[in-house]
Image (cartoon, rainbow, N blue to C red):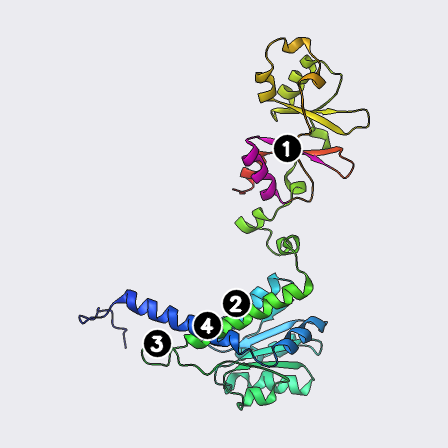
Amino acid sequence: MTAQTSIRDDAFSPEATASRVLRQEGEALNRFAENLPADFGLAVQTILETQGRVVLSGMGKSGHIARKIAATLASTGTPAFFVHPAEASHGDLGMVTQGDICLLISNSGETAELSDMIAHCARFSVTLIGVSKRLESTLMRAADIRLTLPDLPEVCSIGMAPTTSTTLTLGLGDALAVALMEARGFRADEFHVFHPGGKLGARLAKVAQLMHGPQSLPLIAEDSSMSEAVLEISTRGFGIVGITNAAGQLAGVISDGDLRRNMEGLMERRADQVCTRQPVTATPDMLAAEALAIMNARKISALFVLDSQDKPVGVLHIHDCLRAGIA
């Protein structure tokens, strides 16, 4: 049987349908937010205290949602993975240990393929979190913790395709993940550990990961001549040179712009007479995206990176950020 591809010739409007679906699903989420499952806080606390992993499973559309929730949990500090219920019945139950938590999703609560996982949890005292709209279902009766979904109609025209139910389940998974993140105080730098690649990974990179180290630093002493300063700027290629005091701290910088602004009698002056004092700088643990924003705002192309004693440990050029995909 092939799907129909013809467009209805009555007053059907795709835009009106889209608006109705999104509005009704949004209303369903609002109703859910006002009436959270009684066990939600217990679920969060139990997951926080577990020494194992959160094992998610579901069949069909619930399985797709379970995969997404597992991925979100794993990327935000809660070890989690998905097990297909059919594969679980053929050996993958060995992935579930006594220290784990099983989170099983079934809209009806009567998904036959989950029966072996339910029995496994009971046999080995594995904590079971059930997600279903039917509190009296087989899954929810077996569950230690019950996250009950609102029994709201699907928004499709025949009232059968998983739409509202999957949206509510996905929202519940996001709520769990964010609650766990906030309970743990999960930080952006920890998020980067699990997202080292792609655009997101680039934006979470630290200055220390992109900067040029001590061996590349363009530095001269305060009493150096301007001929030494120009030579250092030209040799290092960053368009900037740092001026250090006797303690090795950054006392100022000379940029290409400083050279242009001080052309008259430039070579008869010392570096400390031309440099810009109290320059804007970065720290090694600053996000590279933040450093790039500073450079864009100040219309400069490079920043010195200082340690806690204000001593230069690196230099970051705007091109380093662009090459890393930070924009």
**Which residue corresponds to the image point at 71% horizontal and 76% vertical from the top-left?**
99
Q: Is residue 31 above or below residue 239?
A: below
Q: Is residue 300 magenta?
A: yes
Q: Is residue 308 magenta?
A: no
Q: What amino acid type should be assigned to the residue bearing mark 1?
A: Leu
Residue 19: horizontal and vertical position, in percent? 34, 67
* Span highlighted in magenta in the image: 287-306
**Which residue corresponds to the image point at 60% horizontal and 88% vertical from the top-left?**
142
Alpha carbon of mark 3 to alpha carbon of mark 2: how far? 22 Å
Alpha carbon of mark 2 to alpha carbon of mark 1: how far? 40 Å
Residue 51: horizontal and vertical position, in percent? 72, 71
Residue identifier under label 4 = 167
Q: Secondary structure at mark 1?
A: strand
Q: Secondary structure at mark 2?
A: helix
Image quadrant assignment for residue 121:
bottom right
Q: Which mark sits nearer the N-terminus, 2 or 1?
A: 2
Mark 3, mark 2: which one is toward the viewer? 3
Residue identifier under label 3 = 156
Q: What amino acid type should be assigned to the residue bearing mark 4?
A: Thr
Q: Which mark sits nearer the N-terminus, 4 or 1?
A: 4
Alpha carbon of mark 4 to alpha carbon of mark 1: how far? 46 Å
Q: Secondary structure at mark 3?
A: loop
Q: Which mark sits nearer the N-terminus, 3 or 1?
A: 3
Residue 170: horizontal and vertical position, in percent? 50, 71
Q: Is residue 61 visible?
A: no
**Which residue corresponds to the image point at 59% horizontal and 65% vertical from the top-left?**
178
Residue 325: horizontal and vertical position, in percent? 53, 43
Residue identifier under label 2 = 68
Q: Residues within 10 Å of mark 4 (few under 14, many from 20)?
A: some
Alpha carbon of mark 3 to alpha carbon of mark 1: how far? 56 Å
Residue identifier under label 1 = 303
